[in-house]
Image: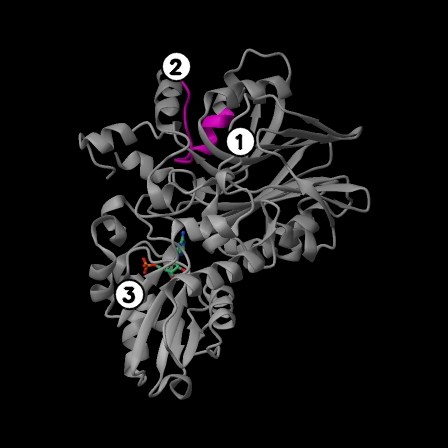
């Protein structure tokens, strides 16, 4: 069943239509969205006659030299950052995917995860499709190419009627930018404007960098077509209950961004306040696990009145350790990433705030580090509920067995990470902080999946395992 694993990925997307500097602005947009994917990046541009593509493994700033951006002429472009997950770090998987088919050239950039991609791929292959990558996004391309509908828009809608799961999707044709969000709105996608040009991006931080004005979110189930005659919006899919990914707030999005209509920083800080109300403890200092634990630690400190301190300093010049696929490298990663500030920790009762515990490896290493630095007590506080179930909609989580909270009680986890106490925010607490709590997917905490994963039923029955 490893095939399902191959389809897991998280990403950032950016697109612009109607600007003479389209590729350059896409480069900047991807730069602002670098946190959503560090494995590879690509840009496809169009001058209305032809599509041009430049993409490579690596970070945005390393890939896009001036020379490469010059090879991307035109007034419209889309770009993509890909996150590295298990295996398949191969160049064939770099997006955008650019193809030529019966209706001309088409490029696609996808953030999300299609839960029925494996089944669709097998069906398409049975009818002769030849896949070039191991990406679920390629399934969409084949479905568009095989659709019997007469125009591109109808073909896109027809293709997406077959897929289940999450997609914030950008498509670029010769003279058209198309943006779509799945009916549940799992992943974010926002619309902005810059000097008459329309911009689509995963997060508002990409609009800020290019000084574009935020207009609104693309709605769940909405398709926008942007071309010479402006922007045209339709809702071609069956309406569904919104299921925005709660993990965008907890970990994934940048704190300066607004996603799902809320600022990420403020939301994280409120998680920290709520965590403090639920798990308060006597202590001398509150420290974050940088960077993702910072806003919640500030909220925790404000709520309790315990001073905030920076007890761990992060080396910013290495990638996120989680992206390394092998355990051995990840262990090493924690050490090279963080170093304690002894003056802040020595002889102190320390509250350590992090956004999540996945396997427990990071917390264990950090606590050891803090204890070695002389802390007298260590109280670990987590601004998300225990992560017990894997995500099938685009957040990189390991298999169920590897999620420590799926098989260990909070007390067992505390022992494993060697904290004096351990406290998580409750799911109810998380729901109090977000506007419209029923609009969120919290499957990773409670196992209620808004879109069924085809193998999940069998997983539950124990017939086969995910790996
Ligand atoms: P672990 O060592 O497996 O328990 O990982 C926990 C750490 O990974 C926390 O410090 C989180 O900030 C971080 N984290 C949580 N979710 C993700 C994710 N989807 N991708 C990368 N890092 C993550």
Cα–Cα gap, marks 1 and 3: 36 Å
What x and y, as percent, mark residue 100?
A: 57, 26
Q: Which residue is mark 2?
A: 127
Of 109 and 63, which appears nearest the observer?
Answer: 109
Cα–Cα gap, marks 2 and 3: 45 Å
Which of the four quarters of the rendered structure image does ligand 1 lie in? bottom left
* Quadrant where the N terminus is found in the figure: top left
What x and y, as percent, mark residue 247?
A: 45, 49
Near mark 3 (Cα within 10 A), the count class, few <14, some 14-19 or many ≥20, is some
Q: Which residue is mark 1?
A: 182
Q: Which residue is mark 3?
A: 331
Of 55 and 241, which appears nearest the observer?
Answer: 241
What x and y, as percent, mark residue 194?
A: 77, 47
Residues drawn in magenta: 127-141
Circle nearer the viewer, 1 or 3: 1
Task: Say whether mark 3 is within 8 Å of ligand 1.
Answer: no
Task: Say whether mark 1 is within 8 Å of ligand 1.
Answer: no
Q: Is residue 452 above or below residue 277?
A: above
Circle nearer the viewer, 1 or 2: 1
Q: Residue at x 30, y 85 (%)?
A: 374
Mark 3 falls on what kind of element?
Answer: helix
Q: Is residue 362 above or below residue 141?
A: below
Near mark 2 (Cα within 10 A), the count class, few <14, some 14-19 or many ≥20, is few
Q: Residue at x 77, y 39 (%)?
A: 18
Comes first in the chain, label 2 or label 3: 2
Contact between marks 1 and 3 (CB within 8 A): the answer is no
Q: Is residue 266 above or below residue 14?
A: below
Q: Is residue 408 left or right of residue 156?
A: left
Cα–Cα gap, marks 1 and 2: 26 Å
The answer, for residue 64, to whether it is visible in the render is no
Contact between marks 2 and 3 (CB within 8 A): the answer is no
């Amino acid at each position: 069943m490893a095939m399902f694993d191959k389809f897991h990925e998280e990403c950032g997307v950016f697109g612009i239509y109607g600007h003479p500097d389209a590729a350059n602005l896409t480069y900047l947009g991807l730069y602002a969205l670098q946190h959503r994917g560090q494995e590879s990046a690509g840009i496809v541009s169009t001058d209305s006659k032809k599509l041009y593509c430049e993409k490579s493994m690596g970070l945005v700033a390393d890939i896009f030299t001036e020379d490469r951006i010059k090879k991307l002429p035109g007034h419209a472009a889309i770009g993509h950052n890909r996150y590295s997950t298990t295996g398949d770090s191969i160049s064939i998987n770099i997006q955008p995917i650019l193809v030529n088919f019966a209706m001309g050239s088409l490029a696609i950039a996808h953030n999300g995860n299609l839960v029925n991609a494996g089944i669709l791929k097998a069906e398409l292959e049975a009818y002769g499709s030849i896949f070039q990558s191991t990406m679920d996004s390629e399934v969409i391309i084949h479905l568009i190419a095989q659709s019997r509908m007469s125009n591109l828009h109808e073909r896109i809608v027809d293709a997406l009627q077959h897929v289940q799961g999450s997609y914030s999707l950008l498509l670029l044709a010769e003279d058209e930018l198309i943006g779509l969000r799945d009916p549940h709105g799992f992943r974010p996608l926002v619309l902005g404007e810059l000097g008459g040009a329309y911009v689509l991006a995963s997060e508002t931080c990409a609009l800020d960098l290019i000084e574009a004005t935020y207009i609104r979110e693309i709605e769940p189930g909405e398709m926008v077509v942007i071309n010479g005659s402006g922007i045209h919006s339709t809702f071609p899919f069956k309406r569904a209950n919104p299921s925005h990914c709660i993990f965008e707030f907890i970990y994934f999005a940048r704190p300066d961004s607004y996603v799902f209509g809320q600022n990420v920083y403020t939301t994280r800080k409120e998680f920290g306040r709520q965590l403090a109300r639920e798990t308060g403890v006597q202590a001398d200092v509150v420290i974050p696990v940088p960077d993702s634990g910072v806003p919640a630690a500030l909220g925790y400190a404000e709520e309790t009145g315990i001073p905030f301190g920076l007890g761990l300093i992060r080396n910013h010049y290495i990638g996120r350790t989680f992206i390394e696929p092998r355990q051995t490298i990840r262990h090493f990663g924690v050490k090279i990433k963080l170093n304690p500030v002894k003056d802040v920790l020595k002889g102190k009762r320390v509250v350590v705030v992090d956004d999540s515990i996945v396997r427990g490896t990071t917390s264990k290493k950090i606590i050891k580090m803090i204890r070695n630095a002389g802390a007298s007590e260590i109280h670990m506080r987590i601004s998300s509920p225990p992560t017990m179930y894997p995500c099938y909609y685009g957040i990189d989580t390991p298999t169920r067995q590897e999620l420590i909270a799926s098989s260990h009680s909070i007390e067992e986890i505390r022992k494993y990470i060697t904290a004096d106490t351990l406290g998580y925010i409750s799911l109810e607490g998380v729901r109090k902080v977000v506007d419209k709590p029923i609009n969120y997917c919290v499957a990773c905490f409670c196992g209620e999946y808004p879109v069924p994963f085809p193998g999940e039923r069998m997983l539950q029955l124990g017939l086969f395992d995910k790996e």
